């Protein structure tokens, strides 16, 4: 599998980890559920994508986890710090930042002439999904910001 595709899968795995860790610290159950659902969507896409490339998911994950280990370790430290603060808006900002990285990769891969139309269509579909996820996270963040502004006004 091509290195940039592995990089994309690594970013998707980091997003999944981010969502799962973040869901543990959110105080609002619907938001916890939302983050778990987003993590599952990332996992589902990774599995289906790897299956299409005739690789075993377990083998690919071992390769990807080796590649992302330094970033994964950094992510855990940063997320622990943000999560310990318990600020939902910062947690959501962290999730949004992860999605922006994924969005950038999708855009780069879609414009690369080396990939066939099927792969580009698949990536375009996921780019649309990523845009939807970002909008969803922005909406959730706006709700938390409005609640926080009401609490500070009281």
Image (tube, rainbow, N blue to C red):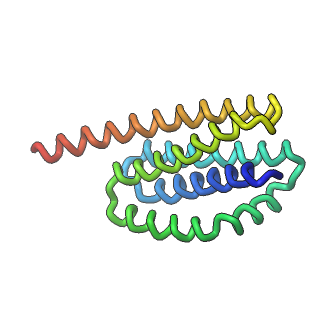
Rendering coords of residue 59 (x, y %): 82, 62
The foreground one among 61 and 20 is: 61
Q: Residue furthest right?
A: 54
The foreground one among 64 and 89 is: 64
Residue occupying the point 63% across, 44% down: 105
Left or right for 8, reference 36: right
Left or right for 150, reference 77: left
Q: Residue furthest left?
A: 154
Q: Is residue 74 above or below residue 146?
A: below
Mark count: 0
Residue occupying the point 76% across, 65% down: 62
Left or right for 108, reference 1: left
Rendering coords of residue 127 (x, y %): 62, 34
Rendering coords of residue 150 (x, y %): 17, 40
The foreground one among 75 and 21 is: 75
Rendering coords of residue 60 (x, y %): 79, 58
Q: Is residue 35 above or below residue 72?
A: above
Residue occupying the point 42% across, 58% down: 25
Query: Could you say which quadrant of the image residue 67 lies in?
Result: bottom right
Residue occupying the point 53% across, 32% down: 132
Q: Is residue 126 above or below residue 19?
A: above
Query: Could you say which quadrant of the image residue 48 lies in?
Result: top right
Left or right for 138, reference 42: left
Q: Split into 4 quadrants, where in the image is the C terminus?
A: top left
């Amino acid at each position: 599998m091509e290195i940039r595709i592995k990089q994309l899968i690594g970013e998707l795995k980091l997003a999944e980890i981010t969502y799962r860790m973040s869901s543990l610290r959110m105080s609002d159950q619907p938001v916890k559920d939302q983050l778990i659902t987003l993590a599952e969507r990332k996992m589902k896409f990774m599995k289906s994508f790897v299956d299409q490339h005739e690789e075993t998911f377990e083998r690919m994950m071992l390769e990807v986890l080796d590649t992302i280990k330094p970033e994964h370790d950094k992510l855990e430290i940063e997320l622990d710090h943000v999560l310990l603060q318990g600020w939902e808006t910062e947690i959501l900002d962290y999730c949004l930042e992860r999605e922006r990285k994924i969005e950038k990769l999708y855009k780069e891969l879609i414009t690369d002439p080396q990939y066939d139309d099927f792969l580009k269509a698949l990536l375009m579909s996921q780019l649309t999904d990523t845009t939807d996820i970002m909008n969803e996270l922005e909406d959730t963040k706006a709700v938390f910001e409005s609640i926080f502004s009401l609490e500070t006004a009281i």
